[in-house]
């Protein structure tokens, strides 16, 4: 991301120097509880003063390891991008004595868990504490938002004054993410990385990549090379398509990991497989290769369930995907398999589950998979059929909440929106925020909810500008539902916090939808 490089004018130099030396100026009382943080933290206590970022700043790391070194560098870049400030990183502090910002790993067994953090802001120092580097990372994201919010405290000055106080914060759900469909339209490695940056800013921790569909196969499988040599060559509307080599996919996975995001790969089957059926004739029951497809119809394709080569194919794909996907999950789709008989669907899913288990991965499937004899511990992604999600719970599954009417990012904001579809209705920014993951299942079943995911299907979305338009400003609301234990669906309060994020949207040159429902700042 672009850094903001500004120079102090001479008029403010003397004031700036005084502040660097620790001298105070009358800035009035501050109120940390009036922040615009998204997601909203568990607890915020104000102290009424300010911590001032000036011309030079020391960053202190409690441990000397790669994770903390990367976090220190990340925070350094955030500060230098938003203030005329030179940062210095130091390691192995014993006590908090000097002025500066401290990143501190604390003892295991605290109530913070893996992703929680404590952010203490005092007039002389800031301390971010966590039990794990992931928690420190999320604490840094909160500080990042406070820096953006409070930049420009003084006119014509790069001095940033942050209200003092203490923030305690832990996530509500362990799974918080979006899905990006790279099959209907293909997106480059750099475009995917930019999306990852957006997720990280809002403490989302999963990027589900929909890698295969009727319109294209987007991931290299070395044992079946024609999947990409031929099956990747088009997309919706007849474009050139594309695919990720395994090396490129690993680059995406590693970049996401550096932002504490897990990439969840999806290979959709047995339906949504026309690209594979076009690439290899033997995967078809009649032995005839299908033509490449550039339309948007669904439910017409199916792997041949009764051929042994189908399962050789599936195992090769899952084996190769497992080798380049260090995360816990593999998504096998399973939706809209209208061309597969109910009996064949059962047979296929039973065999595929065993293959996924063989490679020590947890299976995720769209809610239709709950009709089959799923193993306890399977994850069912509820998108359309509540009865299937409930069946999954009865069979020991956890649920990812992605109800189409509230979370599908490819739905239009309103009737005037050029991009997107409307089969699940319109989803304006208020509707995207005013639902709760535990309220859409009959009974008190929130304990079975693993988390939430907002899918962005790409039938009408073809480039990063269009991705941004469909993501923003809805994405922050999904992040809050997934993270905040204080979520109440209070739109009147939330929209004012959201309005403050236009500052970051503009800094990042995000092509966001300027909804009239939000009182955007000038």
Image (tube, rainbow, N blue to C red):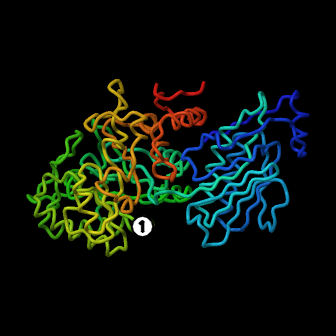
In depth, the one of 317 and 31 nearer the eye is 31
For the point 42% across and 49% down, the residue is 178
Say how many tags the image has: 1
How many other residues sit within 10 Å of disc 1, few (<14), some (14-19) or many (≥20)? few
Residue at the farthest front position: 443
Query: Which quadrant would the C terminus be assigned to in this image?
Result: top right
Quarter of the picture containing the N terminus is top right
Residue 13 percent coordinates (x, y)? 88, 33
Of residues 468 and 191, the one drawn nearer to the viewer in this rendering:
468
Q: In the structure shown, which secondary structural element does the residue marked by tag 1 occupy?
A: loop
Q: Quadrant of residue 443?
A: bottom left
Q: Position of residue 3 (x, y in %)?
A: 67, 39
| Relative side of 479 to 497, left or right | left
> Which residue was labeled with disc 1?
328
Residue 404: image x %, image y %? 31, 44
The residue at the point 21 percent across, 43 percent down is 293
- Front residue of 253/450: it is 450
* Res 320 quadrant in image: bottom left
């Amino acid at each position: 991301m672009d850094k903001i490089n500004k120079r102090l004018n001479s008029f403010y130099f003397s004031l700036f120097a005084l502040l660097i030396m620790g001298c105070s100026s009358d800035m009035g009382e501050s109120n940390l509880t009036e922040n615009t943080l998204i997601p909203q933290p568990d607890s915020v206590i104000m102290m009424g003063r300010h911590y001032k970022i000036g011309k030079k700043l020391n960053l202190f790391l409690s441990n000397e390891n790669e994770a903390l070194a990367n976090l220190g560098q990340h925070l350094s870049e955030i500060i230098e991008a938003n203030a005329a400030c030179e940062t210095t990183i130091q390691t192995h502090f014993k006590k908090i004595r000097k002025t500066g910002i401290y990143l501190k790993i604390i003892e295991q067994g605290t109530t913070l868990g893996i992703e929680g953090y404590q952010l203490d802001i005092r007039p002389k120092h800031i301390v971010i504490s966590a039990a794990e580097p992931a928690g420190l990372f999320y604490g840094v994201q909160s500080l990042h938002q406070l820096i953006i919010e409070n930049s420009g405290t003084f006119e014509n000055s790069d001095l940033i004054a942050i209200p003092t106080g203490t923030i305690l914060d832990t996530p509500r759900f362990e799974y918080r993410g979006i899905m990006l469909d790279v099959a209907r339209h293909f997106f480059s490695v750099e475009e995917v990385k930019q999306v990852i940056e957006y997720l990280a800013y809002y403490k989302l921790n999963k990027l589900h990549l929909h890698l295969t569909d009727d319109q294209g196969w987007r991931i290299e499988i070395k044992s079946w090379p024609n999947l990409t040599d031929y099956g990747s060559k088009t997309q919706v509307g007849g474009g050139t398509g594309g695919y990720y080599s395994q090396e490129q996919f690993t680059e995406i996975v590693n970049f996401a990991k550096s932002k504490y995001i897990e990439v969840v790969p999806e290979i959709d089957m047995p339906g949504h497989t026309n690209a594979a059926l076009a690439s290899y004739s033997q995967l078809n029951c009649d032995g005839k290769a299908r033509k490449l497809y550039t339309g948007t119809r669904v439910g017409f394709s199916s792997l041949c369930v009764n051929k042994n080569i189908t399962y050789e194919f599936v195992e090769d794909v899952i084996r190769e995907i497992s080798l380049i996907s260090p995360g816990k999950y593999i998504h096998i789709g399973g939706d809209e398999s209208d061309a597969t008989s109910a009996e064949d669907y059962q047979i296929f899913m039973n065999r595929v589950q065993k293959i996924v288990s063989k490679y020590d991965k947890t299976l995720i499937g769209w809610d239709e998979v709950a009709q089959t004899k799923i193993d306890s511990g399977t994850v069912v992604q509820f998108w359309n059929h509540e009865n299937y999600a409930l069946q999954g719970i009865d069979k020991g599954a956890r649920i990812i909440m992605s109800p189409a009417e509230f979370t599908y990012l490819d739905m239009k904001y309103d009737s005037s929106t050029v991009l997107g579809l409307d089969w699940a209705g319109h989803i304006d920014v208020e509707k995207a925020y005013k639902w709760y993951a535990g309220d859409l299942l009959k009974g008190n079943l929130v304990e079975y909810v693993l988390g939430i995911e907002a899918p962005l299907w790409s039938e009408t979305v073809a480039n990063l500008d269009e991705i941004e338009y469909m993501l923003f400003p809805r994405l922050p609301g999904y992040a809050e539902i997934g993270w905040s234990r204080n979520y109440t669906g209070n739109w009147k309060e939330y929209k004012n916090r959201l309005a403050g994020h236009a500052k970051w949207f503009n800094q990042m040159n995000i092509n966001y939808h300027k909804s009239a429902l939000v009182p955007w700042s000038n």
